[in-house]
Amino acid sequence: MPTPPLLDLEPIPTLRRRIAAEPAASFDPTRPIRFSRAPGRLDVMGGIADYTGSLVCELPLHRAAAVALQPREDRQIQVFSFNLLDEHQPFMLQIPLDGLIGASAEMLRHELSAPGRSWAAYLLGGLFLLHEQRLIDLADKSVRGFNLAIYSTVPLGAGISSSAAIEVAALLNFVDHFQIRDRLDAMQLAVLAQEVENKICGVPCGVMDQVTSCAGQADKLLRLRCQPHELLAPLPIPTGMRLVGIHSGVRHSIGGGQYGLIRCAAFMAHRMILEKMREFGRAAGRTLAADPLNGYLANLDHDDYKKFFRSYLPESIKGGEFLLRFGSTIDTATTVKPDMFYPVCSAADHHVLEAMRVRHFIEFFEQAAAMDSADPQRGLVLDKAGHLMYGSHYSYSNDAGLGAPECDLLVNLVRAREKKDLYGAKITGGGSGGTVAVLCEIGAKPDAAIAEIIQVYQSQTGKPAELFDRSGPGAWETGTAFVRGDAP
């Protein structure tokens, strides 16, 4: 199905109406306004294993963030949010371009960390990095400021990457405004967006969210090998199947302590396994110069892990002891804290085995896509894919410590209705709440089962559940567009 024109894709029409009705946004209706849009994503398989080099499978959603940009005559940037903090109470922030020129990432992060300002880091961080990396020159006095406005339909804290949608939408708008798209490709823009998250927002995320928001294709699974970011051919969804998300109503945040803890523990496990490899090499009279895993725990065969290395990993180790014995890790987004205890073995269990689960999930998905929909064996293959999703979910809770009782309930409700054409379910992204991805058939019976799951869930928890049941295009495909006039 062809992608609709950008200006027809929500939430751009809504943002246009909100701008027209809000004088405080300071947009001149007689002058061109550039619009961009970037979607959230449904993490189908892989999740947090992105930062240890796993394959991941992600679906771009129809829910998206839209950004409007209009040049000003001065060197001020005015950022207007219609709903990032409160649907009914817009927020505005002004900052001079000159304030970005002499700043460091740490200074900007501190400046925008104050209450009511943190949302602006996701937009302004991209502008700062474009200048810092000399893709644009904000010190050039001919460069003018601009008004920015944002409206997003990606719920905050739902685990479907609201932050990546904002970062990518803003960066794409800046790139086209400064006419530098020929100096970047989709992957480079996504990596810049990840740097916004890591350096400016202070969140140690991997790159899969930004890549999906930028380079995803509607109704296909983006397939990414995160070493560091190798984009593979998209994974077709088997005919008659779909993937939907059910938001648990529990707010998720990868800025939380457990996410950073388990990430750091995984890199500690990698360092300890590498040291054990060197010991094996010395015992055999060989010197191990390079890392056989090329820096990624996902490259460790799961059978070798169980046979040779797992028994050497402690269930828990204090950061100070690790630093004394092994030194620092290779991770640039986390730091081993001397007084903290790290669950090294369970972190390694999740990441090594998750990488294996994703590989098998892709094999079963490709096998099912090549089969006739009437083939009775096809359902068995899809069932295997679905059970890998269940395995991923339970590992999130038991090994990574990133589960949530409400998400467990949703997954169990799906599993109890497997005979109603539901095949699998798992918590998504960084876990600890957020959304559950569900693999199901297209049709009235699975639709009724999902509606029943939502009703039962809400009655048992008292929390509102929300269904994400549509896919949409990535930002690079749709680009940017003007509302009035020609490009300035």
Image: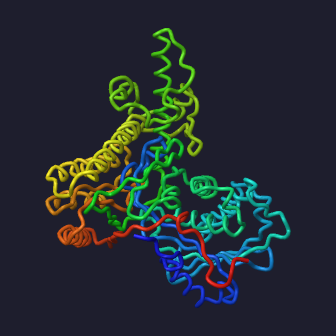
Picture quarter containing residue 171? bottom right
Name the image quarter holding the C terminus. Answer: bottom right
264 sits left or right of 357 in the view: right
342 sits left or right of 89 in the view: left
Q: Position of residue 101 (x, y in %)?
A: 79, 61
In this orientation, which residue lies closer to the viewer: 207 or 230? Answer: 230
Residue furthest to the top: 285
Residue at the image position 46 percent from the left and 10 percent from the top: 284
The image's colour scheme reads rainbow
Q: Position of residue 186 (x, y in %)?
A: 57, 57
Q: Position of residue 155 (x, y in %)?
A: 45, 70
Numbered marks: total:
0
Residue at the image position 43 percent from the left and 55 percent from the top: 222
Q: Position of residue 346 (x, y in %)?
A: 37, 38
Residue furthest to the right: 141
Residue 322 drawn above or below residue 459 = above
- Whether residue 360 is visible to the viewer of this picture, yes or no, is yes
In this orientation, which residue lies closer to the viewer: 356 or 455? Answer: 356
Residue at the image position 33 percent from the left and 49 percent from the top: 397
97 sits left or right of 416 in the view: right
204 sits left or right of 69 in the view: left
Name the image quarter holding the N terminus. Answer: bottom left
Residue at the image position 35 percent from the left and 48 percent from the top: 396
In this orientation, which residue lies closer to the viewer: 196 or 69? Answer: 69
- Whether residue 410 is visible to the viewer of this picture, yes or no, is no
Picture quarter containing residue 417? bottom left
